[in-house]
Structures are given as structure tokens and as C-alpha cells.
Amino acid sequence: MTVSAPDQCLWCGEPFAQNGGVGRPRRYCRRSHRQRAYEARRLAAAHRLGPDDVLVARDTWRGLGDRRYRLQAAVEDVMADLAEDPGALRQAFDHLLEAAEDLLAFPLEPKALGEERP
């Protein structure tokens, strides 16, 4: 069995390796992501969402906004710290990195996705 270069899961965006078996190439890294994508497409169709429309839960939207604000504030703090004292680079970087990691770790999963059209 041959393993090709990694593809990206259409649901989570994580890379995964294709198995060199017969049939269509996989589009999702796991079966649960294929199921979630199916459910999201059904919900999108019920709400008549276009290909660029996405539904997310209110708590998810607020959580993303909070984390984005935190990252923006961290960037501004780091820029101010570096303007005052260029030697404070490590502390400034750690502050920025913590805010960025918080945003990256935040689960952002759509409720529905409009179907993409080629």
C-alpha cells in the first residue's frame, strides 16, 4: 500500500495521508468529520446558505471575538514595550505568544456551511 503526500481535511483543515487503496480519495481525516460535514451541508441547505455563508453558535462567535481582541491588545502591548525598551524582547514575545496560542487553541467549528461550487 502506498501513502501519498498529505491532503487537508475539508472539515478541520488538518493534514492527513491518503491510503493508496482503490476508490475515491478521502476528503476527511476521520469518519466523524465526514458526518459533521454532511450534517452541516444539510443545515445549510435548510437555511438556504450560499457557498460563502457560515453559521456558528453565538458562544463560539463571542469566544472568537474575545480571543481576537486579546491578541490585538497583546500586539499593541508588545509594540509599546519594544518602543520603550528594545531589551524587553523576550517578555514581550512571551506575552504575544500566549495570546496567539489561546486563539489557535480555540475550537472554531461551524454549525452549517454553504456548499462550495467549483
Image: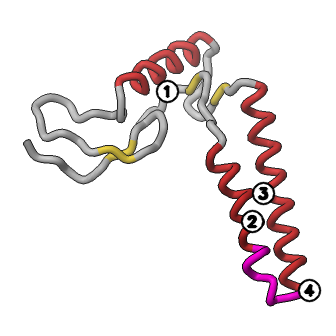
Specify the label residue 96 is tagged with: 2
Q: Is residue 52 above or below residue 4?
A: above
Q: Which residue is mark 4?
A: 84
Specify the label residue 71 is tagged with: 3
Q: How many marks?
A: 4
Specify the label residue 115 is tagged with: 1
Where residue 103 appears, as percent x and y from the top left, is: 69, 49
Q: Amino acid at mark 3?
A: Leu
Label 3, label 4: how many angstroms apart (C-alpha)? 20 Å
**Which residue: 36% across, 29% down?**
30
Name the image colouring. secondary structure
Give the magenta range: 85-92
Left of 103 or right of it: where is 50? Answer: left
Where residue 43 appears, as percent x and y from the top left, is: 57, 14
Mark 3 or mark 4, earlier in chain: 3
Q: For residue 91: magenta?
A: yes
Q: Amino acid at mark 1?
A: Glu
Mark 1 or mark 3, which is nearer to you? 3
